[in-house]
Image (cartoon, grey):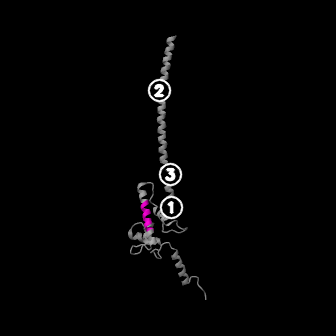
Amino acid sequence: MLRYQWEDADRKRVRTSSRQKQKFTHTAGSRSFASVAEAEEVSSDKKIGRLQLFEIIHRKKDGSPMTSEAGETMEKLKEKKAEYEAIASTDSSVNLENIDNRIITEVLGPERYGRQYMPSGSQAQAKVQMLRDQIAQMQASTVEQIAVVQRKYEELQQQLTADAAAGEAEATAMAAEQSIKYDELQLQL
């Protein structure tokens, strides 16, 4: 008889090992995370971010986390988000557009090549965001440098005006002194 490559026992073994390798179990079943996010967006009429999707997928129907690890991770994600929001409230140069990706990368670690923990924009978008942040920092430093150069220019302008006034006063004094000497010489002749 022929032996099929994927008999039931083989499939069961592969699926079991795959489930054991998962970092977190989720409630999405065989649906993709993107389809879960889309369904949630349709039902709530709001855009669902990666952090919200993580919470939706890793909670049971009663609202409790799937595992204690998932609960701890959700708490860490909330803390990081609060930190970033606090930083953003004090620093206007922080961009909150791509913050979910950064938080997930910091808490869950870097994603494996070709994999993502949650659907998001492409890596190119992350690169664009990084470049935008660099541009904002460069613009801020350029503004500071311009202000410093402007102050130095004004100081030099004031010093030049003071030197010119002092030189003019000195020239006037010298002219007066020469006039007096000339008058004295005229009297001696």
- Residue 179 falls within the magenta-colored stretch: no
Q: In this view, does 32 lie above or below 126?
A: below
To which residue does mark 3 refer?
138
- Marks counted in the figure total 3
Secondary structure found at label 1:
helix
Secondary structure found at label 2:
helix
Mark 2 neighbour class, 10 Å CA radius: few under 14, some 14 to 19, many 20 or more: few
Mark 2: amino acid: Ala
- Direction from residue 176 to residue 62 in the image, left or right: left
Label 2 to label 3: alpha-carbon separation: 46 Å
* Disc nearer the start of the sequence (2/3): 3
Mark 3: amino acid: Met
Locate residue 183, reporting x and y percent.
49, 15
Locate residue 184, reporting x and y percent.
49, 14
Secondary structure found at label 3:
helix
To which residue does mark 2 refer?
169
Locate residue 166, reporting x and y percent.
47, 29
* Disc nearer the start of the sequence (1/3): 1
Q: What stretch is highlighted in magenta?
A: 73-83
Q: Do the residues labelled 2 and 1 touch (CB within 8 Å)?
A: no
* Disc nearer the start of the sequence (2/1): 1
As drawn, the label of residue 135 is: none
To which residue does mark 1 refer?
126
Tag in front: 2 or 3: 2
> Residue at left 52%, top 63%?
123
> Residue at left 46%, top 35%?
158
Locate residue 180, reporting x and y percent.
48, 17
> Residue at left 41%, top 58%?
86
